[in-house]
Amino acid sequence: MTRILIDIVTAILVLSGASSEEDLSESEMERYCHYAEHPLRINIASRSRILASGLMSAYQVASLEDYRRRNGDVLGVLELGLVDGFNAKVAEALGIFVSFESTRPPGAREDRRVNQTIMLRTGVRNKDGTAAAVGAKYHLEAGERAEFNWSSRNSYASPGFPPGTFSAALYGKGGGKIILGDFNARFGQGLAMWSGFSMSGFPTESAFHRNGTGFSPTGSFNPSLRGVAAVVDKSRWTFSAATALRPADDSFRLMPILAACRLGRRGQFGLLAFCDEAATLSADGTLGLGHLTFFGECAISSRRLQENGMTILRTRFAAVGGASWAPAYQTRITALARYYPADYHSAFAGSVRSSSKVADENGLSLGARLGRTGFTFDAARHPAKGGSSFKGIFQTEPSFALNRITVSPVLKLSSRYRPGETFQWRNEIRIDLKAAPDAPTAGRAAGMQVTCRLHLLKSESWARLAYAECGYKTPSDSAAVQLSAFLRGTYFKTGSWNDRIYCYERDFPGSFSVPACYGRGWGLSALMGVKLRRTRIRHSLYLKGSIQRYPGTGRAASSELKLQYQAGL
């Protein structure tokens, strides 16, 4: 069978709806990499535990529970792909982040083993002077009932070491949970509240629809909310409540959050209310009718403002909704409409949008997917700013095998038109090529690997970027010693900052690096890693070095050396 998943990053793209690594964020990379190291046991974990992971939507979790009640445990990737709400591609991607351990036999005690992981990271950079940075993470799991996260780091620009992120969660047998400390809150389509990562633009058809997972703990270096949250499951109803601390002048104020969600056989319906600088109320729903799926959310936001020496109450209504039609396997067409007033208060919103922050935007979008080929088109208008934007993206991802080598080329064409700007057009063509030997484990690339990219862009002037990367990974995940090494060379030439090209660069597990390439220059980066599994304690050590040079431009050269150690028990 031809593999379409070459590495963990490609699996993340499948599950997130992003079209390329540049669409992602560091917090998403941290979350997925955590579950790659600590797979979620979907046959044992409670519903609230699976939802908290963010790997599946509420409908997928309910469908999985129903399948297990009727047929028993899911025993592999192929079987997971047959469950309603999943398909072969999604199941193969999830295979990297979940495990299929069977539930314990009758009479056996609940697994309460304590698993711990500690990560230490340091780096030194030389760019107009030398600076150092450090970071640390700690994660603890007590069976499927409790987990604790702590993480903190500084940066090259800020040498102080902050207290960081603290997050503790307790999971009940009935599906409820309590979270203390930092947490994420993701509801509905994100029109009212969507903390953490929120992808902008419409890179693929899958990005049109959000899958809210409610409250969940976080170990991210960049937390969103801090306080206490609780979730209670009653049959098909889920009730959630939280209180978050929000800064107010020189003190803090409390922000209450209340939510209720009903999950039915054909979809779900939810209500959300919270009060911060504005009082916000929203209603969202997803309805499945055979090959058709309807989804949407509407919200009302009211806040007090001072205008002309008077206090007024300004209330605004916003809405987003769409429909998706899947007439055949791996075929889907989705349409979306949105209305975001200019003064809609959207401090926590993370709904789909083109170039705004869920405000001052009216738009229509269309996306389609046929097998491994897809396109999206978006038209947006910004009434307050007096501007508009039109963007189309076409992408195809054929995959084939040559002498047991999986070759996965990706062609992406995009064009953006903004009539009100000086440089109205921004056209791009990008070709990626990945090659790796077929792996016995789904989605796990091993052996020698080659990745190349050619990226051409025309805006203010022509810009170009090319890189080639070769690497090696130990073939077996069960090997006592696992090695990996990657070497990349990059060349770029752009006319100005308006022509910059963002290019993902391989980094430590859980790290994310997407430098902006502009001007003229080249770079080299090398990443080496070793994992030891000889004893109960699992050790991993990574070393990365990189240099960037800008000959003839007057820009300062830079170099960086980073080290990361992780131990798991």
Image (cartoon, rainbow, N blue to C red):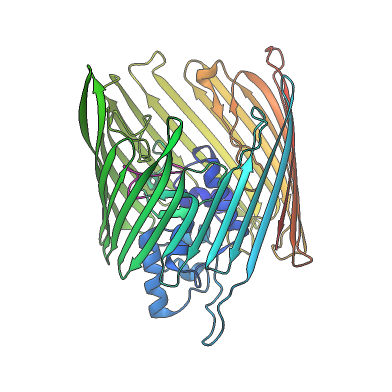
455 relative to 395, above or below: above
* Horizontal arrangement in the rendering, residue 76 relative to residue 139 (left or right): left
367 relative to 441, above or below: above
Query: Residue 32: horizontal and vertical position, in percent?
Result: 55, 52
Whether residue 48 can be seen here = yes
Locate the C terminus and report the quarter of the image it occupies.
Answer: bottom right
* Horizontal arrangement in the rendering, residue 542 relative to residue 393 (left or right): right
Which residue in the rendered view is the most extreme toward the bottom?
107
Query: Residue 217: horizontal and vertical position, in percent?
Result: 49, 54
Query: Residue 76: horizontal and vertical position, in percent?
Result: 53, 70
| Residue at x 51%, y 41% (from the top left corner) | 24
Q: Could you say which is closer to the camera, residue 377 or residue 133?
A: 133
Locate the N terminus and report the quarter of the image it occupies.
Answer: bottom right
> Does residue 191 belong to the magenta stretch?
yes
Which residue in the rendered view is the most extreme toward the front?
251
Magenta span main SS = loop
Q: Could you say which is closer to the camera, residue 9 or residue 198?
A: 198
Q: Could you say which is closer to the camera, residue 504 or residue 560?
A: 560
Query: Residue 205: horizontal and vertical position, in percent?
Result: 37, 45
Q: Which residues are magenta?
A: 187-199
| Residue at x 64%, y 53% (from the top left corner) | 138
Q: Could you say which is closer to the camera, residue 121 or residue 273?
A: 273
Question: How many numbered marks are there?
Answer: 0
Whether residue 55 can be seen here = no
Quarter-of-image position of residue 439:
bottom right
374 relative to 147, above or below: above
Quarter-of-image position of residue 355:
top left
> Does residue 397 belong to the magenta stretch?
no
